[in-house]
Image (tube, rainbow, N blue to C red):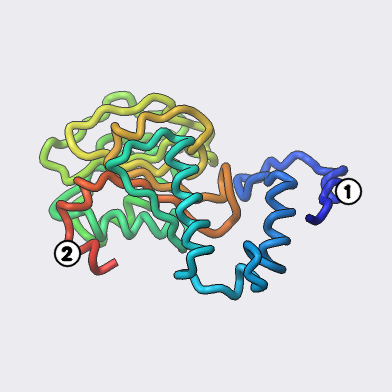
Amino acid sequence: MTNSTQNTAKKVHNFYAGPSILFPKTFDESVDAIHNFAGTGLSILEISHRSKEFVEVMENARQIVKDLLNIPSEYHVLYLGGGASTQFMMTAYNLLEKKAAYLETGKWAANAIKEAKIFGEVVLAGSSADKNYNYIPKNIIIPEDADYFHYTSNNTIYGTQIRETLKSPVPMVCDMSSDIMSRRVDVSKYALIYAGAQKTWDLQVPRLLSSEKIFWAKFPEKFQQC
């Protein structure tokens, strides 16, 4: 195995919004997998994504997330390409039937709202745009006939964070890109959680999506199209 000790001796603190710091073991095992993955004689970049070796990688990756976040068995965990911003569109495309409620607390929430408006009516459950997003709205009003309620848990640009789990009369969706795994979260309170993996725990490529199976079942035709 490659010895990365000398490569990390001068490791510096990383204050970027993403990607996150990785452990030396991660580099070592990644290098090994590129040269000879799981004793196959092939690089992980060369083997089929349907091979038993790679399927095991993905199954382990899903299980680790389930264990760390204590995700209930009735939830799916998906790794998807495109970054969390792609989920702004995909959330509305799959879930917005008539109207959705959004909490506007920063740039990323505003971007999510912009995408959702392409697919249907968007109702603001609350907004702090009047003061350049320097606070979290208190009087949040969520219509009971909304298809879902969406909010962004942490706003890196403006320095605000929603630390408690909000209450919603409709299925709740949350973009946790910049604070997922930084604190305990009751996943069962959410219908859908998504996050860009690079922010706090992975490389700068995938996005994580955890969704309740029952919520998916409400929109079978649209999910089949994704």
Residue 86 makes an appearance in the image: yes
Residue 95 locus on image (x, y percent): 22, 53
Q: CA distance from mark 1 to mark 2?
A: 53 Å
Residue 157 locus on image (x, y percent): 54, 41
Give the crowd class for mark 2: few <14, some 14-19, many >=20 residues within 10 Å: few
Q: Earlier in the sequence, mark 1 or mark 2?
A: 1
Q: Which mark is residue 6?
A: 1
Q: In front here: 204 or 105?
A: 204
Q: Is residue 108 above or below residue 187?
A: below
Give the crowd class for mark 1: few <14, some 14-19, many >=20 residues within 10 Å: few
Q: Which mark is residue 221?
A: 2
Query: Helix or strand or loop: what does disc 2 sit on?
Result: helix
Tell me the amino acid under the disc marked 1: Gln
Q: Residue at x 71, y 68 (%)?
A: 35
Left or right: residue 77 compared with residue 225: right
Residue 25 locus on image (x, y percent): 72, 47
